[in-house]
Image: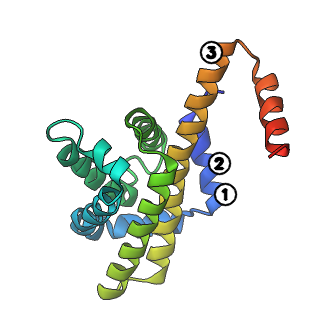
Amino acid sequence: MTLEPQAFMTKLEKRVGLTNEDKELLKTNSEWGLQIAPEMADHFYDYLGRDEEMNGILHTGEGRIHRLRETFIEWFHEMFTGMDDWGVVYAERRWKIGLVHVRIGIGPQHVVPAMATVIHEVGKRLETDGKSLALKDALGRICMIDLAFIEQAYVEVSSAAVLQETGWTEGLFRRLIATGARSM
């Protein structure tokens, strides 16, 4: 169950309908994205900080929240630049970001609503700054791709851990999950 980041990226682009026009629109607005990134980081971490569990994770160790905030700003801007036209480098970086979320314990139940908060706040800035609905749509699509990487990291890490600990085959594991899901 090993994820290949570029293949996953390509599949997600098709699923969410991220087009070359979307990519060009994002690139054209990359300076704007960098300009608003600190504000979006504030919204993201303010939201997460209101949760007692997340607040503890975010403030573990001196300077952690500052480093996370700087990483968020970089991540946010990269959605606009695509780094390498949303290719191998972009996909591998998104995969690593997902793995970091797993490692430090920022789960999908935290990231999904925090991302929704960011998308909502970006929408308000788009309107205030006179940006197009097409840019909002493009940014929404790339956000969903990035979010899928984070969620998939949880699936892959959990599955790999179970397979390693039990010695089960991937086929058996998938059958057990399907059986368990039917019984709930």
Q: Is residue 118 above or below residue 158?
A: below
Left/right placement of residue 159 relative to residue 92 reads: right
Circle 3 packing at 10 Å, graded few (<14), some (14-19), many (20+), is few
The residue that label 2 is drawn on is: 11
- Expressed as whole percent of the image width and height from the top left, the position of residue 115 reads 43, 61
Residue 182, quarter of picture: top right
- Residue at 22% from the left image edge and 68% from the top image edge: 35
Give the mark, 1 or 3, whose residue is nearer the N terminus.
1
Q: Is residue 62 above or below residue 141?
A: above
- Expressed as whole percent of the image width and height from the top left, the position of residue 66 reads 18, 48
The residue that label 1 is drawn on is: 15
- The disc label shown at residue 164, or none: 3
Circle 2 packing at 10 Å, graded few (<14), some (14-19), many (20+), is few
Give the mark, 2 or 3, whose residue is nearer the N terminus.
2
Total marks in image: 3
Q: Is residue 64 above or below residue 81?
A: above
- Residue at 40% from the left image edge and 53% from the top image edge: 82
The amino acid at mark 1 is Arg
Left/right placement of residue 114 relative to residue 125 reads: right
- Expressed as whole percent of the image width and height from the top left, the position of residue 131 reads 37, 83
Secondary-structure class at tag 3? helix
Secondary-structure class at tag 1? helix
Spatial distance from mark 2 to mark 3, Cα to Cα?
A: 27 Å
- Expressed as whole percent of the image width and height from the top left, the position of residue 24 reads 44, 66
